[in-house]
Amino acid sequence: MFENTMNINVWLEWSGALIGIMGAGLLATHSRVAKYGWLCFLVANLLFIAWALRIGATGLLVQQVCFTLTSLLGIARSGFLPSNHVENKNESSSPAR
């Protein structure tokens, strides 16, 4: 039982680390696929949250909850979610003075 728990903890730790590294690499490309880095970060955050809960690491848990909020902000700003922004036609068609 103890060995199985350790295997899960190791899997959570290394999966979170590798997926987080992949997310950072994607964001660093500044290419059309860069926005998928935010999804990688979100998955890594969730894995690290699960790991922190399992090992009782309160500081890591707080950090990852905050990082999850920044990941969600990145997802929202990168175009994954539909925009409710309505462009004002008067502003866009009027010439600059």
Image: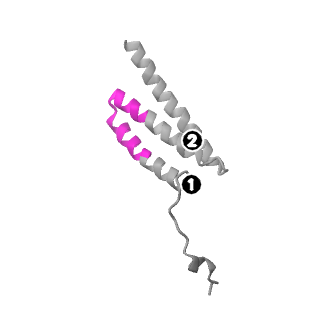
Disc number placed over residue 79 in the picture, else none: 1
> Which residue, as the protein is rendered here, is positioned at the far bottom?
97
- Mark earlier in primary sequence (1, 2): 2
| As drawn, 73 above or below 59 | below
Mark 1 vs mark 2, foreground winner is 1
Q: Main secondary structure of the magenta part?
A: helix
Residue 58 forms part of the magenta stretch? yes
Q: Position of residue 85 (x, y in %)?
A: 52, 65
Left or right relative to 59: residue 86:
right
Q: Label 2 neighbourhood size at 10 Å, few (<14), some (14-19), many (20+)?
A: many
Seen at 47% across and 53% down, the residue is: 73
Q: Closest to the observer: 27 or 32?
A: 32
Q: Closest to the observer: 57 or 31?
A: 31
What type is the residue that disc 1 sits on?
Gly
Seen at 41% across and 13% down, the residue is: 3
Residue 37 forms part of the magenta stretch? no
**Real-space CA distance between mark 1 and mark 2, rounded to the nearest whole angstrom:** 16 Å
Q: How is the image coloured?
A: one colour
Q: Closest to the observer: 21 or 31?
A: 31
Magenta range is: 48-68
Seen at 62% across and 83% down, the residue is: 94
Disc number placed over residue 23 in the picture, else none: 2
Seen at 49% across and 33% down, the residue is: 16
Mark 1 secondary-structure assignment: loop
Left or right relative to 18: residue 69:
left
Q: Label 1 neighbourhood size at 10 Å, few (<14), some (14-19), many (20+)?
A: few
Q: Position of residue 41 (x, y in %)?
A: 51, 42
Q: Position of residue 90 (x, y in %)?
A: 57, 80
What type is the residue that disc 2 sits on?
Gly
